[in-house]
Amino acid sequence: MIDKSSRDLISGDNWVRNETDIRTFELVINGKEESSKTLKVEPLMCIHGACVLEEVEEVELEEGQRLWSNPESWGDREGGIPVEGDDVEIMSGWNMLLDLNETPKFKTLTINGRLSFIQKSEQFDIHLMAERIFVRAGEFFIGSEDEPFTSEAKITLMGGQKSETLTLSGTVEAGNKVLAVSGLASFYGAPRDRMSRLLMNAYKGQDKIVVEPGLDWKEGDEIYLAPTAMQYTHSDYRTIVSYQGGEIILDKPLDYYHYGDAESTEEEFSVDMRGEVLLLSRNIKIHGEDIDGWGGQVLATDLFEMDGTWRKGSLMFDNVQVYKCSQKDAYHSSIRFEGATGGHSRITNSAIHNGLDWGLIVWSSNNVEIIDNTFVGFRAVGMNLDLIRNCTFTGNFIGDVLGRGIEFIDMTIDKEACVAYSSYVKP
């Protein structure tokens, strides 16, 4: 139930006028738009404020490990090893190692036990594909703090705007194309050098820039060059062709000028005005399938089961790349903490970039650390913070956040902010 007036309601709001199971709504049609002649109404499941999920019978984690590729690992599951289109569950107590280079495209993957990407001494890349991934009562590991993942790990969230949504509760809308976590998701990628400053001016039309020598940047890495002039829209995204001794050859010429110098301007002006060059590439990647302009999303939230069990959603991301996420004209940001009050989350040294709307949301959540990350390439809001407690935000770069091309919405100017703090709860 919401407390908006009827004139403030927008598409997606849950408007409950009474306490019965009967819901009413009013519709006005002006008849001017010839192309809109149908109305589709889809009821939501959570009519009593809490969705009924099938109960999880929790057991202790087994001592041994199961290989995904082994049919015997799946117990009495009908069909054995999951195939394309399946609803897959990692059962409570299972300790499953994903040892496939590429999985089929699953409809859902629910984790109530433990799922880990296998770590081998030689290069072994893994690509997991699913419409919805729900870490409900379990744990999802890629690497660890002591042993970061060294191969390439990719999670692709499949589907489009009309794909089936994940039902969690009556208060948090998980949506679709989502990695939702009410347990623990812990991803540690290979450490990378996050940022450099330009050591020489970089001019429009150049395909070469000079940054610090000795970085771990390499051919194929994606980088972002921040604006340095008054024009805040003058960002450049490029791919490295080669890097040697601080000189970078780019895949194509720059569109804009970026200021650089061998010496910092901090002593003279109290701030280093040289252009930032930020690395976007990481070896752990989460992205939305490129279909109908609808991005993926990562959600951390608490979940109260019908038996009273309190599940505390926690994310631990270090050196993770999240891109083609956030969903257009919705509050489903690339990464969203909503109602995550009981756990502890930390996102560090990661690159969250080129989404379709908001970058990061932390709403009604506690114990969240956002440290030394890059958030670039979003619409309306880069980072939104509201109703938070015991949260840390430091060392983050937020830029290239542009308006949505709407000057007025019912006489309200559209938001365009790198950081929005307690400005509004929903767009």
Image (cartoon, rainbow, N blue to C red):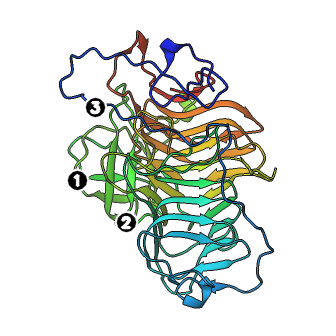
Residue 284, percent across and down?
Answer: 51, 65
The secondary element bearing badge 3 is classed as loop
Cβ atoms under marks 1 and 2 closer than 8 Å: no
Disc 2 crowd rating (10 Å Cα; few below 14, some 14-19, many 20+) is some
Q: Amino acid at mark 2?
A: Gln
Q: Position of residue 366 (x, y in %)?
A: 75, 40
Q: Left or right: 298 with respect to 274?
A: right
- Of badges 3 and 2, nearer the viewer stands 3
| Visible residue check, residue 148 | no
Percent of width and height locating residue 22: 57, 28
Q: Earlier in the sequence, mark 3 or mark 2?
A: 3
Query: What amino acid is labelled 1 in the image?
Result: Lys
Marks 1 and 3, how far apart at CA: 46 Å
Q: Nearer the viewer, mark 1 or mark 3?
A: 3
Residue at 61%, 84% in the rendered image: 76
Q: Assign a secondary structure to mark 2.
A: strand
Q: Which residue is mark 2?
A: 244
Residue designated by label 3: 38
Give left or right: position of 398 versus 410.
right
